[in-house]
Image (tube, rainbow, N blue to C red):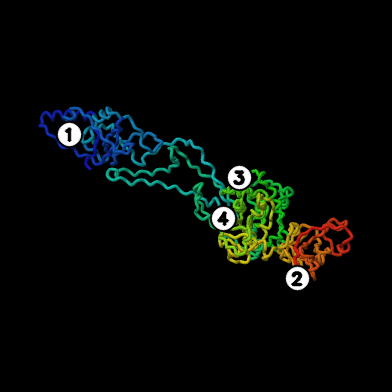
Amino acid sequence: MGEEFRPRSIQERIAALNQSHINNESAPKKTPPLPARPSALRTVPVPGGPMNVSHDVTVAGNSATSPTLNRDGTSPQTLPVQQNHDTQTNAQKQPPPLPRRKSTQPAPALPPRQPSTQSRPQPERKASLESIASSASGMTTTTSTSGTSGSVGTKNVIRAPAWGETELPPLPPSSKRSPPSLPRRPSGINSSTVAEQPRPTPKPPPPATGAATARPSKPALPARTPSYTSNGSTETRRVPPQLPARRPSSHQPAQSPGEQDATTGVVRSVSRRLPPVVSPNEISKIRQSSLSVLSKHAEEPEAPVTNGHSNQSAQPEPPPVPLASRPDLSAIQATKPKFQPSASQTSNAMCLKCRDFSGPDNHAAQFPRTSLPTHDLGWLAQQLTAPFPSLTDKARAIFTWLHHNIRYDVDAFFNNKVKPSTPAQTMQTGLAVCEGYAGLFATLAAHAGLDAHVIGGHGKGYGYTQLPPGASLPAFESNHAWNVVRIDGGQWKLIDCCWGAGAVENKGQPTFIHRFDPEQFTQTNDEFLLKHYPERIDQFYTDDGRPKWAWEEYILHNPDRPFGVEPPTIFNVAHEEGISRHTVRPVGKQVSINQPGPMRFQFGLICEHWSVTLHGKKSAPYLFLLHTHGVDGRKDEMIPFTHVRGTAPNGGGDWWYVDIADPRILGAPGQKLGVAFLTQLGQRTDGRGLSVEEFRANFGRVNMAWSYVLQWELVA
């Protein structure tokens, strides 16, 4: 560039002004060319007062910089400089040549910089239009103000300090608290292997071209320890104290090399350790002890650590746990109700006829509907079924509870006022028809974890009559509902809760008889289907695996006459003694005295597993007698039955029989032939366990009492 600008003194400026007046008077007025502008200029923004107007003042002697932006990010606007009339007149005259600055003359020193605690722009100074205009009128350097040139004084020249030539003032102490102590270092890491990541050193900017190249080299900035936080305050980072080395532990998982702690930001260099080699003996011990862990270091106690330092002082061992006060699990379980199946149930769990349901039945009777604290069906299902692990017992408890707490709505059924109801409504009112029974059972079973469904179809219940011979076959009609539930062994069991709760009798004035019928739960599916025909083909669940029964076969079959004839009369006491109506012979109600002999009369118990003593809870079976009337009905006689013990493991499956060589001794036509058991013989008021020899020795000599269980009619 050309000659370097040198500021002039006041005397030189006055002399230059006088010379210019003299030249203007003598010489013709001629506009001289403007001197060349120095290439190295620095523009400094001058605050512009309320309008935020800034001046671009040219500063010589420093490297060029870009203009400064306003606070809102816009470019600073230039303000026209007010000049007087004399200055405008002298601008048309040729100014005197500027003296040259020596190349070796150093730049004037800058004033000391005001201390600052922030790296943000300096706060605004006083910036009024009057002060800007008065300052601009006394300057001699050229000013770029919207195309108008002016003069700038030397004392208003602003020089920015070169980078790296000054030191920042010390920052005030931090007002924040000291950082919290570091967390406890995991065992197995040596403090010598932990190193803090070095802080990168800031690099100086590249050297400026032009006049700045002649300056001496700038010294490097010292390392700055304080760091600025987001709010402008300083915070000095403290190096945490080194933790003592811990004893290596085989149970401490090894960290990967170079892993950085998320809490402290410290990079840890941990060497990976291989697990110890397991000997063949230890492998065999592990296989034998299953879940036990064998390690020779497992029993070594680790030194306790407090605040990052190991506590070497001996700590007292905790007292041993008193075993006497430890709760006994067996004693707790003994207080809960347990209903374990008997040996006979274990031998044949699928036979429900001989299964002892006294546990579920007695438990279900303890939850009357009117005394429940809540009508929540889920709570009730859990209370009824929780003590029983067997699915069959769970279903039986719900079946029995419906018998005790839900009554058949006779008024709604016979007056055509039956409306669809929900299980909650049935629970609230305690009244239901067959659909309400089935829906409530399915809901309670679902809450108890059972798989149960409602089946609709035809039922041979109240009002059913057998079709007369030659009558037309009626169409299918759905008039009943029942359930199917999955019990033990995955078996699907058909049950009827409505008929199990009681029966409707008295055709003139129907009345619900509250009578428990366990056969609606225990009978086989084939026996159940004699009175139930589902509307869907996949809901038969037959025992023999047949896909379905034909509608004609079902509707023409009379369930009260399984063998096609009217069966003999069976009294209720027979069910109490475990006698099954399917085992009674002869199967017909009428017995001819003129048929050839011999003739056998027999009966047996409910099933081959049922025992009078085990399932019937009786001390011994009764002595059964066949009461005949002799030839022409003129001589009554009591013939004892032969008792055949069952071959089941617990004595179940007993049966009784008697053979009559000549049927004419049974009596005359029209007389009744019955089977009775002795209830009293002489001084013996209990006839159980009475032998045939005792009966024959005292027959006709002492008083006797008996009760009938079966009865036939004698015909010619």
Q: CA distance from mark 3 to mark 4?
A: 22 Å
- Mark found first going from the N terminus, 1 or 4: 1
Q: CA distance from mark 2 to mark 3?
A: 107 Å
Looking at the rendered image, the disc whose residue lies closer to the viewer, 3 or 4, is 4
Q: CA distance from mark 1 to mark 3?
A: 85 Å
Q: On the image, numbered disc 1 is attached to which residue?
A: 96
Three-letter code, disc 2: Gln
Three-letter code, disc 1: Pro
Name the residue located 58 percent from the left edge and 58 percent from the top edge: 457
Name the residue located 68 percent from the left edge and 46 percent from the top edge: 368
Q: Position of residue 441 (x, y in %)?
A: 62, 52
Camera-side residue of 176 and 376: 376
Q: CA distance from mark 2 to mark 4?
A: 96 Å
Label 3, residues with CA under 10 Å away: few <14, some 14-19, many ≥20? few
Q: Are marks 1 and 4 in contact (CB under 8 Å)?
A: no
Label 2, residues with CA under 10 Å away: few <14, some 14-19, many ≥20? few
Q: On the image, numbered disc 4 is attached to which residue?
A: 253
Three-letter code, disc 4: Pro
- Mark found first going from the N terminus, 2 or 3: 3
Three-letter code, disc 3: Thr
Label 3 sits on a secondary structure element that is strand
Position of residue 203 in the picture relative to residue 710 (left or right)? left
Label 1, residues with CA under 10 Å away: few <14, some 14-19, many ≥20? few
Q: On the image, numbered disc 3 is attached to which residue?
A: 306
Label 1 sits on a secondary structure element that is loop
